[in-house]
Image: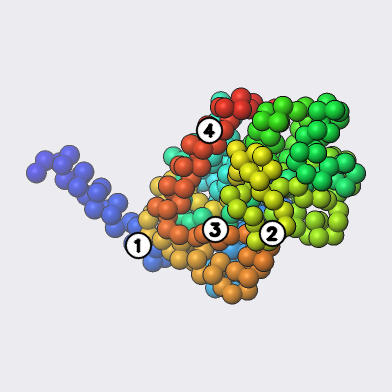
Amino acid sequence: MGYKARSFWLAVALGLASGPAAAQTYPTQPIKIIVATAPAGLADLVARTLAQKLSEGGHAAVVENRAGAAGAVGADAAAKAPPDGHTLFIGMHSTNAILPHLVADLKYDGIKDFAPITNIATSANILVVHPAVPAASIAELVAYAKSNPGKLTYASQGNGTSGHIVGEQFKKLAGIDIVHVPYRGAAPAIQDLVAGQVSMMFDVVPLAKPQIAAGKVRALAVASPQRHPAVPDVPTCAEAGFPQLEGGPWFGLMAPAGTPRAIVEWLNREAHKAFTAADVRERFLSQGVTLPLGTPEEFSAFVASESSRWREIIRTAAIRME
């Protein structure tokens, strides 16, 4: 066997051995979980819950919020981190399935640059309006918007989020003129909606539910196939005449591409342990969040299908980044 051949097979052998060896010593330092949004949103809650459970299990973990450029700043930082399992990312609909179809010069690939670990949390968008808006249904909202073009505003969690894309899709389907107001996350958006600074929002069920119960916003429809168990009295968008409006956020654990398989599997097990804990599971489910979890392969297939679905919605509605 020649020198080049021996070198090749030695490299292969070392590569195969590195995965199990890495898992045996991992983690060797605190695990950093990057969140591409501001604190207080659902992505942040998912990350901090995981960090707390990892720390309780003896594995120090911290959360780093890296908001900016509609989430691209945090995603790019995570994609370029060393693939050793010490930097993780809360991948989500916007950063991994929507922005790649909105931003031409995105510095990362939403699929190729990440190793999916598990899909932690999903929810549904819900259309809510400020009580001052004279509409108790989508039909009344559309009629009012057509009579008052440009008067209504809709908040979103930021450019490229599901709230933004569904809002633009709604505008096109209904043929109405409402003004998009992007925020740096869900928390400041809902705060301004409650304060009456904006008219409406495609929020997410967990964050909107307390505001609905308190009478601070009025729910008109939920963008899910069936009525949502957390808000059973709210009709679906399909019931309201807009079956195309179906979507919502998802938040899953990812690592930089090239992270050893053994580490991915370890993280998958730890994430499952964290989010199947009785206290955590009950808290999320009661707020209207589904916890799909699953294997890395299942999450990988899900991300690919979501990317394809949002690409078609963006193309059909001719949505552009603002």
- Spatial CA span between label 3 and label 2: 23 Å
Q: How many marks?
A: 4
Specify the amino acid type for callout 3. Answer: Ile
Asked whether, in this view, residue 244 is left or right of residue 192, the answer is left
Asked whether, in this view, residue 9 is left or right of residue 34, the answer is left
Q: Do the residues bearing badges 1 and 2 touch, measured as CB atoms within 8 Å?
A: no
- Lower sequence index among marks 1 and 4: 1
Residue 114: percent from left, percent from top = 47, 45
Quarter of the figure with the N terminus: top left
Asked whether, in this view, residue 17 is left or right of residue 257, the answer is left
Q: Residues within 10 Å of mark 1 (few under 14, many from 20)?
A: few
Q: Which residue is at a point 65% across and 39% down the rendered structure image?
A: 242
Q: Which residue is at a point 38% across and 66% down the rendered structure image?
A: 24
* Residue 14 in sight here: yes
- Spatial CA span between label 1 and label 4: 40 Å
Q: Nearer the viewer, mark 1 or mark 2?
A: 2
Element marked by disc 2? loop
Q: Which residue is at a point 78% across and 60% down the rendered structure image?
A: 210
Q: Nearer the viewer, residue 165 or 38?
A: 165
Residue 214: percent from left, percent from top = 85, 60
**Disc 4 target residue:** 311
Element marked by disc 1? helix
Q: Do the residues bearing badges 3 and 1 touch, measured as CB atoms within 8 Å?
A: no
Q: Which residue is at a point 87% across and 41% down the rendered structure image?
A: 133
Specify the amino acid type for callout 2. Answer: Pro
Q: Nearer the viewer, mark 3 or mark 2?
A: 2
**Disc 1 target residue:** 21
**Disc 3 target residue:** 120
Element marked by disc 4? helix
**Disc 2 target residue:** 232
- Spatial CA span between label 4 and label 3: 23 Å
- In this rendering, the answer to whether 102 lies above or below 58 is above
